Amino acid sequence: MDVTHVNPFIESFMKVMPQLGFAEVRKGGLGIKGQDLTCSGIIILVGIVGALKGNVVYRIDTEHAKKIASTMMMGMPVEQLDDMARSALSELSNMLTATAATEFAGLGISIDISTPTLLSGDNISVKMSSKQVLSVELLANDTSVEVLISFEN
């Protein structure tokens, strides 16, 4: 996978999260995963079409998802992931991916994104677009978000 296709997602996280109230934003580890993933917690899938085709998945541990939703809702306590919290998390993925699309446009790469699909639970099976999936851990106030990026060859 071309690193120029990964950096827009990292840059979008670094731009968007501070605007939502996260003071410390940083990149964690990188890794490669296979096409078939099994995830638990909150999974938000966004399709990508245009000059690049594929998908991006945002994976967030349930407790971290509650913290993110709470911060996005001006510190309102989030005891469970109700409709309001789920809506906030879906909107976050929309904001992150749309900002990445703007970053891609700056590189001369035109893409469009789908409406986010949010799933939650344990042992969720996800089949990504390509055989190799890049995993990037991004942290906001030490709350981890794993971004799984997959583009068709």
Image (spheres, helix red, strand yellow):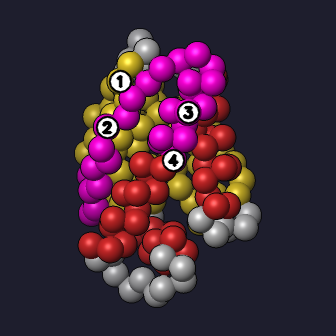
- Determine crowd level at label 2: few under 14, some 14-19, many 20+ residues with C-alpha closer than 10 A: some
> Helix, strand, or loop for circle 2?
loop
Which of the two labelled residues, at mark 4 and mark 3, occupies the earlier sequence position? 4
Q: Quadrant of residue 107?
A: top right
Q: Is residue 68 left or right of residue 38?
A: right
In the image, 137: left or right of 90? Answer: right
Dot 4: what SS? helix
Res. 38 in view: no
| Up/down of 113 relative to 64, above or below | above
Q: Amino acid at mark 2?
A: Ser
- Disc 1 is placed on an element classified as strand
Q: What is the distance, in whole Å, between disc 4 and disc 3 at their CAs?
A: 10 Å
- Residue 134 counted in the magenta span: no
What are the residue bounds of the magenta stretch?
96-124
Q: Is residue 113 rendered to the left or right of residue 139?
A: left
Mark 4–mark 1 distance (CA, rounded to whole Å) = 16 Å
Which residue is label 4 attached to?
96
Pick the front one: 105 or 55: 105
Q: Name the residue beneath numbered marker 1.
A: 49
